[in-house]
Amino acid sequence: MSQPRTVTVLGATGSIGHSTLDLIERNLDKYQVVALTANRNVKDLADAAKRTNAKRAVIADPSLYNDLKDALAGSSIEASAGADALVEAAMMGADWTMAAIIGCAGLKANLAAIRQGKTVALANKESLVSAGSLMIDAVKKHGTTLLPVDSEHNAIFQCFPHENREYVRRIIITASGGPFRKTSLAEMATVTPERAVQHPNWSMGAKISIDSATMMNKGLELIEAYHLFRIPLEKFEILVHPQSVIHSMVEYLDGSILAQIGSPDMRTPIGHTLAWPKRMETPSESLDFTKLRQMDFEAPDYERFPALSLAMHAIKEGGPRPAVMNAANEIAVAAFLDKKIGFLDIAKIVEKTLDRYTPATPSSLEDVFAIDNEARIQAAALMESLPA
Ligand code: NDP
Ligand code: MG
């Protein structure tokens, strides 16, 4: 029998983390867990570490170190805490690392994992939006295999002519349209976070659910796809497809279109990256075409979803713009979830931050963090000036 593959899950207590652990735990003879990380959820982290007999559990919030130690008492699992511990966990040399921390907070650990030159399954799109060139350069330099987990990008990856990218006429990124696809702007102005996190097709963490509702998620995904597949921007198209069964498509020069289709369950793309280049059984339901009956398509509405236009402009302008946009969006989404601003204020804050703050193009990780930090400060200040 072959040796178990060593795996690390960064962001093990989140939605993607749970789905990843579900697959790993069904196959503990094939996968050996090196490190699991979380931000503050000690109990979930310690339970997962014990169930999988992980070598190390890491909590990002340093004040929770003792709690983690206590929760792991009686086991031989190592405990560590703090931002540096997160990076060290990513450097333990796992064969496969799931990058599923939310937001730019995952960037350092993702880069550390990429620098190991093994396989990184990337869910954390914000890191690629803010530091795409740096991350892709590191992938090339270290000969790392970077596998996209985001369902659209995983679909494109499965249909893409990797050795002949010049064959691509068009990449069609599908979008569900989120919970407010048919909601008027007047109604959107009053929606609560509780309502906005209810996605019609996917079960996800709070931040990405709000991004889906504003459609900023699709904007982030366009930028993510641009970095991952390196074809000209004008070849990407966004298409609203409310059933979320076609996860994205690649059109070839001769007019052939390849699509990856399946039930909306993240365990399919995660399983694809976990087994790659082989395939594995997952518990994702087989798609029943007779129940599906129809598939709908429509163009995105840029007026009701201005976040999408903001992202398109940000990637066209390039340089620091995507990093500024991402940071402002993270701050605005957190404020909306905290009931400090309204739903439509999210895009307004992002737009105003982009209007106000134009730093130089980042050339190092430090530059990216400086831009990220300043954009957060500017976005927070703008929020204070919003009419009550
Ligand atoms: P969740 O909010 O559910 O989970 C986030 C994870 O990151 C948790 O483990 C959390 O720990 C940890 N975390 C949060 N903040 C920090 C921090 N400052 N430092 C270290 N760790 C931190 O997010 P999702 O699983 O939904 O999303 C993860 C990533 O995957 C995102 O980038 C998202 O865009 C992307 N993605 C998600 C999809 C989905 O279906 N959910 C689909 C496609 C992409 P704790 O639990 O302790 O807070
Ligand atoms: Mg997606």
Image (cartoon, rainbow, N blue to C red):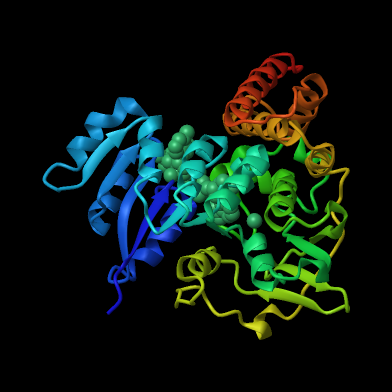
User: Can you give x and y, in whole percent of width and height, for residue 224 in the image?
Assistant: 68, 50
User: Can you give x and y, in whole percent of width and height, for residue 16 in the image?
Assistant: 49, 54
Q: In the rendered image of this protein, does residue 207 appear above or below residue 375? A: below
User: Can you give x and y, in whole percent of width and height, for residue 185 in the image?
Assistant: 83, 40
Front residue of this view, candidates 296 and 266: 266
Residue in the image at 72% along x and 44% along y: 216
Residue in the image at 29% along x and 71% along y: 3
Front residue of this view, candidates 98 and 185: 98
Q: Is residue 339 left or right of residue 174?
A: left
Q: In the rendered image of this protein, does residue 220 appear above or below residue 360? A: below
Q: Quadrant of the N terminus?
A: bottom left
Query: Does residue 208 appear in the picture of this structure?
Result: no
User: Can you give x and y, in whole percent of width and height, for residue 43 in the image?
Assistant: 29, 43
Q: Quadrant of the C terminus?
A: top right
Give the farthest residue toward the bottom: 290
Q: In the rendered image of this protein, does residue 199 appear above or below residue 24? A: above
